[in-house]
Structure formats: C-alpha cells, structure tokens
Amino acid sequence: MRLVRFFSWALVLGAGATAAAIYWPDQAERIAPGAGARALALRAALPPGLAGPLGLAPPAKPAASQAPAAGGQRPPASVVLAEVVRKAAPVRFDAIGTVQPAASVVLRPRVDSQIVEVLVADGASVKAGDVIARLDSRQIEAQIKQAEAALAKDLAALEQAQRDSARLTDLLTRGATTQLAVDNSKTAVQTQLALVASDRAALDNLRVQLTYYTLKAPISGRLGVLAQKTGAVARQGEAAGALGAINQMSPIYVAFSLPQRLLPELREAMKAGDARAMATPQGSSVAAAGKVAVIDNAIDTATGTITARAVFDNADEGLWPGQFCNVRIVLRTEENAVTVPRLAVQTGQTGAFVFVADGDRARQRPVVVARILDDDAVIASGLQPGEKVVVDGQSMLFPNAQFVVRPKAGAPQAAPGAPQAAKDGAAPQPAAAAPASKT
C-alpha cells in the first residue's frame, strides 16, 4: 500500500512539473537547458480543444520566410551576438570604507581658569599655532613678577658676596686677615650662585605655566564645536571634559577591510607602487584618488579579514571624518585579458557556460570566469578572441540550437521600402539580414 501511495505522489509531482514547464517554457529553459524546447513540443502536441481553453493555443503560423523546418522542429531563436575581445582589464576589488583623520587632537586646558576670549568660530579651519582661546592669566603673571623680583634680589646679594670675597682675598695677601675669613666669603659666593640658579628655574617654570593660559592649535585641521564659551571656567583633567577637538583633513585616511586571501597581492602591489585606491562617498558621484598606505599588523581571526588604510590628499575636503565610502582598490592591470559582455555568461548545474556561434548553430561551452568588471566578464579559459557569443536570447537556446541574428537595440536599420539587394544586386543587405547570422 505504501509503495502504491509513493508512486501515486510521484506521478502527481511529475505531472505538476510537466504542466508548469508547458506554461512557462522560458523558466524551464533557465533551470535545465533543453527543457524549454521539450515543453514547447508538448504544448504543440496538445489537442486544440484542450489547448484553447487552457490558454496554451499554439502561436500564429510564421511567415513563409520564417517557417520551421520540415518535421515540426522548433523555429530558429532570435539572438544578439557579441565578439570575444582582448583588452586591458584591471585586477581590483571593492569594499566599504570609513574616512578617518590622519591625526585628531582633543583640546583640554592644563590649568583651572576662566575663559576670557574665544578667537575662532565653531567648525573653523585652523592652522598649527593659531590661538583658539585665552584663559584668565592675571594670577600667574603676578607670580612671574614676584619671581623676577626675587631673582633681582639674589643677584644683588651675589654681587655683594663676590665683592667681599675679592676684598678679603686681597687683605690675605697683605696679612691683614685670616684664611678662614677668605674661605667663608667664597662659600657665601657659591651659596648666592645657587640661589640665583634656583630663582631662574622657578621663573622659567612660571613662564611655561603662563603658556597654558593660551590654547593654540597643535595641528592644522578643522575645529569642531567648542564645548565651552567665553565666561565659562575651564578645568583640567579628563573628568572635566574637553574644550573641543581638531581633526586633520589633509591628508586623510580611508580604512577598509579585505579578505586575507588578497593580502599577498596587495602587498606585492604596494611594493611595486601600483596599489591605487578610489573612494566615492555614499551619496556622492565624485570619486577621490589615492593610494594604499598602511596595512594592519594582524588578521582578524573572527572574520578572516585584515584592515588597511588608503591615504588621500583631500585638498577640497571631499572626504569627511566618519563618512562611509565605496572603495575600489586596483592592484594591477592585465593588458591582454580575454573579455566578453557579462550578459553572455550563464550558470548551469555544472558551472558557468556561454553559447558560442558556430555558423547558425549555438554550441554550449563551459568557461572559467576570473572576475566581473562592470559590464564585462574576464574569462580565464574556454574562449578565444574573435569568437562570437550570444548576449541576448539565451533563454530560447539549447545545445546545437539553430538561431538567427537580430540587430542590437539602437543599431541602424534599413528604411521602409528600401530595395532588396538579394534580388537586384543594387546594394548590400543590412548587417542584421539573415545571411549575417551565419558569421
């Protein structure tokens, strides 16, 4: 009983698949080459009384010039051909990248003080050394004056000690004083010299601290929005928050990830100086040109990718930090690559294949596709330059099927009423005429 049920379900499924193929022969041909032709033959074999109500009536009989061959064979399929050519084809890959500044500096005050003046606007472009803001520096300036006075006092004491030491030394030569007094005067001179050195160091320290009250741009770039304005009290330390940040805009990086299998080729291209990069910001049609500059020192074991950076001049600031970009990396260019239109390449159960024109017959041939470049497919093996392949109409073809060539869209055609060269020999036929299909 189970065996009977199994065969019953098999018959039902087979009948359903056959009916679907009869209704949609084009889709059946895409799934299995040759199935579309058999489905059309089954449709033609249906009785007229059954085919009409089901909407499967055979099409109107073709004109005499296009009548099918004897024996009820399928009429020739109408196709468009293209030639296999050799041309320069780049070796490249595409990725999604993120724009990163080559340098980014956070502005933080190094002292606690009130902001008395902000000299730039939010988002302004600044150069290294430009003053961003000034803090209240009156207290440090008073301390500097105090240190200068202490230094002057100790310099005067040093001068007095030096005079005393010189006088006692002269008296010692005359026998009017003792050696102890001379030695004590020399010690006093050394002590004053140390005090003067200490005063000068303290003064230098205060002068350095004075520079903390003037916030300058450490790098050239673009300033962000300042978190504090005139009158606010700026405080030192990370807990107090930053005043703002400056991002270097030129040059600038675009970081992207690539599969680890491409790492050897990328390193060879960088070594030869050929690793070019094109970055197109999302939402823009203008691409920036640069080159790959840095490869990270480790592969991400979780994803099997490695991060690299391309550097761009970005003089017009077309790339903005944090922006997503479509990145195209060109490793090298093959000057004599075999290419066909990508529409010619079909995929079957055994892999990629194309239909090659052999007279008025279409021969199915397997090919190995190296890569896809826009509208072209680079063929590693299976085709030779000069051969003709089908780029439109493959759905109606099967191995060794007969075809006729139709002109491409937009190709010039003969005007209505033009004389027929086949009869009078006055002029050659248009390129899309039937004889051209045999080339």
Image (spheres, rainbow, N blue to C red):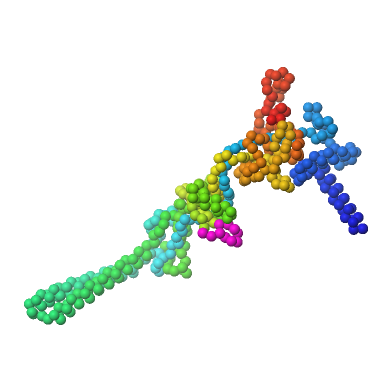
Relative depth, front residue between 429 and 48: 429
- Above or below — where is 107 with respect to 202? above
On the rendered structure, is 133 left or right of 146? right
Residue 20 visible in the snapshot:
yes
Residue 159, position in %: x, y? 18, 71
Relative depth, front residue between 365 and 274: 365
Residue 358, position in %: x, y? 71, 34
Residue 322, position in %: x, y? 53, 56
Quick one: quadrant of the N terminus?
bottom right
Q: Residue furthest left?
A: 174
- Above or below — where is 122 with respect to 383? below
Whether the magenta-drawn stretch holds residue 305 is answered as yes
Residue 343 visible in the snapshot:
no
- Residue at 87% x, 53% y is 9
Relative depth, front residue between 18 and 231: 18
Say which quarter of the image contains residue 179. Answer: bottom left
Quick one: quadrant of the C terminus?
top right
Say which quarter of the image contains residue 136. Answer: bottom left
- Residue at 27% x, 69% y is 200
Whether the magenta-drawn stretch holds residue 140 is answered as no
- Residue at 19% x, 74% y is 189
Query: What is the count of numbered marks?
Result: 0
- Residue at 45% x, 60% y is 105
Residues shaded magenta:
297-306
Residue 2, position in %: x, y? 90, 58
On the rendered structure, is 168 left or right of 151? left
Instruction: Characterize the magenta stretch by its predominant secondary structure.
Output: loop
On the rendered structure, is 398 left or right of 224? right
